[in-house]
Amino acid sequence: MSRDTILKERWDILVSRLSSKFSDGDPLELDAIIYLVGVQELGQYHKKYKKDEKVNLMHIAICRLLEPYGYYEFSFFDEEGWPHYKIKEALPPLKAGEQSVLMKQAIVDYFIEKGFIK
């Protein structure tokens, strides 16, 4: 099986499982899954977030997701418990489709690491 086929199968399984758990079965979009990763990483689940906090949660998620690829490195937690990352290496210029594939692969890897999917 090709790498793309394996990624698609794992992605579909992940979207299905997350969607049934968090959106009554309506398929979650990539951005929504990134947001969920941000909430998971922050660990403050039962809080209403303002718009700017939601953007920050997505930033946390992207940093955490791309950390294993060498683009970011965890730096510290601030006094409110929010994680901060520093850039290790600039992301290469990617087309929209390439960005999507990179993020999907990083998300699948994250949820495999967490034991949510195989």
Image (cartoon, rainbow, N blue to C red):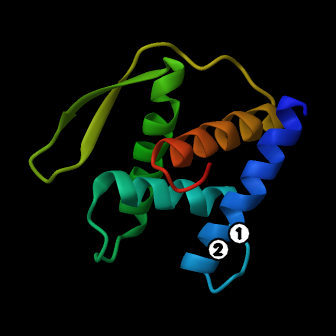
Q: Residue at x 43, y 61 (%)?
A: 54
Foreground: 116 or 48?
116
**What numbered label is drawn on residue 19?**
2
Residue picked out by circle 1: 16
Q: Secondary structure at mark 1?
A: helix
Real-space CA distance between mark 2 and mark 1, rounded to the nearest whole angstrom = 5 Å
Tell me if mark 2 has few (under 14), some (14-19) or many (20+) residues whose alpha carbon lies within 10 angstroms of its own. some
Location of the N terminus (image quadrant): top right
Q: Residue furthest left?
A: 79
Q: Disc 2 marks which amino acid?
A: Ser
Count residues near mark 1 (Cα–Cα under 10 Å), then give few for <14, some for 14-19, many for 20+.
some
Horizontal side of 77 relative to 38 (left or right) equals left
| Image spot of residue 32 (x, y percent) | 59, 63
Q: Residue at horizontal 49%, vertical 17%?
A: 70
Q: Quadrant of residue 64?
A: top left
Q: Give coordinates of residue 88: x percent, y percent.
A: 42, 14
Seen from the viewer's position, the closer of residues 48 and 33 is 33
In the rendered image, the vertical position of residue 78 relative to residue 18, given as above or below: above
